[in-house]
Image: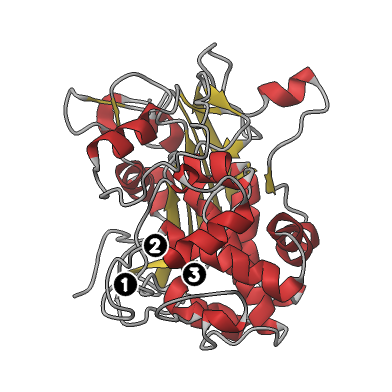
């Protein structure tokens, strides 16, 4: 194992902070620059030990938020959306009325997370439930990362386009760019089913969150008129790991649910750098990737300053991430792992990502990637 293969590094114990953590069984890392493009692969994609491949399909988890963000970029570029319109202009809303900009910045005052399937089993019911929940804090006071914000943004997309979210994302982003990103993967053959990485052994992670109230207090009690959700037997593969997306929203949401390959993610990153496709303008990319009130958060994208330019990126709970270097030599880096597919505590996604950014193979694309300016 050498640093020249960052995927091999991720499946080694080098990424573990102590003996209580376990590295992911498999990993894929992709990188692109004006000089080269490469994909590195290591380990296995499922509990049966099938090898991870460059074209293995992964549950992208919260990297879905970046595709939702790109869909909103397309709507802004077409003149169909003003980021400073209140959300009530698009959807039914009660209480403090955030703007699309505040939702993208995670400054809408919404709770980070709730087990929405306690009280809703359809997307329409989820969208009605979110504004009725207690607020996490005042609007525009501070950054508070929120799945509920991006669930709401999915509803905004549907209201503007008049189409379901999966259709809107396909028509506005993935199909024009020729990307294989999709919700609810379908399998035309047994081989297709085996091309999807398993994402977790079971749903115990969310069950612990509900039972302990950690890391988020649970405000939503189960509706006695609804049957308890049927937990999926493990391992989980081919259906979205996120409990709200799967149990309450049919696998389609603005915050989670997309599947795709690492090369798909790299291609999406390239489309943010080269806007000749016409889906969004370079000015819109600049607006969406420039920090606002919070120095490390832009519109949908997280941002890290670099000595030259900045890294616009986002992680996913399943062990995925996509980053794009803007304002310097253009570069794209993407990562996918199955960090939950083993017993014990998994290595956090952010630590896996740091290891990729600092590896010999990708570090030359992002000089001093961990430098954060005050």
Which residue of the protein is positioned furthest toward the front in this rendering?
225
Q: Position of residue 196 (x, y in %)?
A: 63, 29
Residue 84 left/right relative to 345: right
Q: Residue at x 46, y 72 (%)?
A: 104
Mark 1 or 2, which is nearer the eye? Answer: 2
Tell me if residue 267 can be seen. Answer: yes
Residue designated by label 1: 307
Q: Position of residue 136 (x, y in %)?
A: 29, 66
Q: Nearer the viewer, residue 133 or 44?
A: 133
Q: Is residue 23 above or below residue 362?
A: above
Q: Residue at x 54, y 63 (%)?
A: 128
Q: Is residue 81 above or below residue 339?
A: below
Q: Nearer the viewer, residue 186 or 208?
A: 208
Residue 265 left/right relative to 109: right
Secondary structure category for the residue under label 1: loop
Residue designated by label 3: 329
Q: Nearer the viewer, residue 73 or 55?
A: 73
Q: Position of residue 303 (x, y in %)?
A: 38, 68
> Which quarter of the figure has residue 206?
top left
Mark 2 or 3, which is nearer the eye? Answer: 2
Secondary structure category for the residue under label 2: loop
Q: Residue 133, labelled with which disc?
A: 2
Residue 273 left/right relative to 333: right
**Mark 1 to mark 2: distance in Å?**
42 Å
Q: Count how many numbered circles sit on residues in the image.
A: 3
Tell me if residue 5 can be seen. Answer: no
Which residue of the protein is positioned furthest toward the right in this rendering?
188
Q: Earlier in the sequence, mark 3 or mark 1?
A: 1
Q: Report the quarter where the C terminus lies.
A: bottom left
Badge 3 vs badge 1, beta-carbon distance below 8 Å: no
């Amino acid at each position: 194992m050498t640093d020249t293969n960052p995927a091999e590094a991720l499946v080694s114990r080098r990424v573990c902070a102590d003996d209580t953590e376990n590295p992911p069984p498999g990993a894929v890392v992709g990188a692109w620059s004006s000089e080269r493009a490469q994909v590195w692969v290591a380990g296995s994609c499922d509990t049966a030990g099938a090898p991870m491949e460059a074209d293995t399909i992964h549950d992208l988890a919260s990297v879905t938020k970046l595709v939702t963000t790109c869909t909103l970029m397309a709507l802004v570029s077409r003149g169909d959306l003003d980021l400073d319109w209140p959300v009530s202009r698009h959807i039914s809303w009660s209480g403090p009325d955030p703007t699309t900009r505040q939702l993208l910045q995670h400054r809408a005052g919404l709770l980070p997370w709730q087990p929405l399937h306690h009280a809703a089993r359809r997307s329409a019911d989820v969208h009605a439930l979110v504004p009725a929940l207690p607020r996490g804090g005042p609007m525009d006071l501070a950054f508070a990362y929120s799945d509920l914000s991006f669930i709401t943004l999915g509803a905004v997309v549907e209201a503007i386009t008049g189409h379901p979210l999966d259709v809107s994302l396909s028509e506005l982003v993935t199909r024009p760019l020729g990307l294989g990103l999709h919700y609810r993967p379908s399998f035309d053959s047994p081989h297709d089913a085996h091309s999807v990485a398993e994402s977790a052994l079971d749903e115990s992670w969310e069950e612990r969150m509900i039972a302990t109230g950690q890391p988020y207090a649970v405000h939503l009690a189960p509706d006695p008129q609804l049957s308890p959700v049927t937990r999926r037997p493990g391992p989980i593969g081919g259906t979205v790991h996120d409990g709200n997306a799967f149990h309450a929203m049919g696998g389609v949401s603005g915050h989670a649910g997309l599947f795709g390959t690492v090369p798909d993610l790299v291609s999406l990153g390239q489309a943010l750098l080269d806007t000749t496709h016409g889906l969004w303008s370079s000015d819109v990319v600049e607006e969406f990737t420039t920090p606002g009130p919070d120095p490390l958060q832009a519109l949908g994208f997280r941002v890290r300053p670099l000595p030259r330019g900045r890294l616009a990126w986002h992680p996913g709970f399943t062990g995925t991430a996509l980053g794009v270097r803007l304002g310097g030599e253009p570069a794209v880096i993407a990562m996918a792992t199955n960090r939950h597919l083993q017993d014990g505590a998994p290595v956090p996604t952010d630590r896996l990502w740091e290891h990729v950014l600092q590896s010999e193979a990708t570090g030359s694309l992002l000089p001093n990637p961990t430098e954060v300016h005050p």
